[in-house]
Amino acid sequence: MSGVDTIVSIALGVGLAAAVGFRVFVPLLVASIAAYTGHLHLDENFAWLGSLTAITMLAVAAVVEVLAYYVPVVDNLLDTITTPLALVAGTVVSAAVITDVPPLIRWSTAIIAGGGIAGVTQGVTTLLRAKSSAFTGGVGNPVVSTFEMIAAVLIAVLALLAPVIALALIAVFCWLAVRLVRRYIRGAAKNVRQTAD
């Protein structure tokens, strides 16, 4: 495998992992269908992901997950459950598509980059939903849920078609996420100071 191919497979893994942070099962379903139809090469240890059984199970899980995020209160509860699940799923999907590299490099990259980016995207969407719940009483949460679902599909498909572009888009998202979190922390600190005064 050439250096370019390695970079592309890492970009693909990170792109799919980022999509997992928006919706856990939707990007896994996209990857599973792509592998089943021969459009995605998986590491031999993850061949099961490209099976019809995996597609069926992931399709059911994806539908349940998407619908559950439109149920008030349940959406916030799901964030607490899906955060650790996103870290694991981001690691697994990255490891599945980073092929032809030594296991140490594959798993290190999958855990740090894949699990890490899944955690970042999941954390940002959790923060957005919490803010939406606080400011709109949950009325705005379906908008957040729709955005997350669309982002999960678009980023997963873009990662398959143009992994390096997907990686660039993720870098922009991370930059915006850092700005959002800083603004949130500053706002919280200001509120604490005002309350103390």
Image (spheres, grey):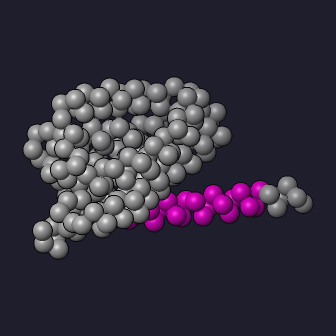
Report whether 32 appears left or right of 27: left
Give the camera-side residue of 97 and 179: 97
Report whether 184 appears left or right of 180: right
Report whether 54 appears left or right of 197: left
**Main SS, magenta residues:** helix
Can residue 191 be seen at all in this image of the molecule? yes
Disc tally is 0
In this view, which residue lies farthest toward the right?
197
Give the camera-side residue of 110 and 82: 110
Q: Quadrant of residue 139?
A: top right
Q: Which residue sits at x=45%, y=43%?
A: 85
Quadrant, the N terminus: bottom left
Residue 39 image position (x, y, % from top left): 11, 47
Give the camera-side residue of 119 and 99: 99
Residue 57 image position (x, y, % from top left): 29, 28
Q: Which residue sits at x=32%, y=26%?
A: 60
Q: Which residue sits at x=28%, y=48%?
A: 156
Report whether 117 appears left or right of 180: left
Q: Which residue sits at x=35%, y=32%?
A: 62
Does the stretch in magenta take in 168? yes
Region rendered in magenta: 163-191
Residue 82 image position (x, y, % from top left): 48, 40
Can residue 163 be seen at all in this image of the molecule? no
Does the stretch in magenta take in 122? no
Q: Does residue 50 sit above or below 166 in this rendering?
A: above
In this view, which residue lies farthest toward the bottom?
3
Quadrant, the C terminus: bottom right
Give the camera-side residue of 173 and 194: 173
Q: Quadrant of residue 53?
A: top left
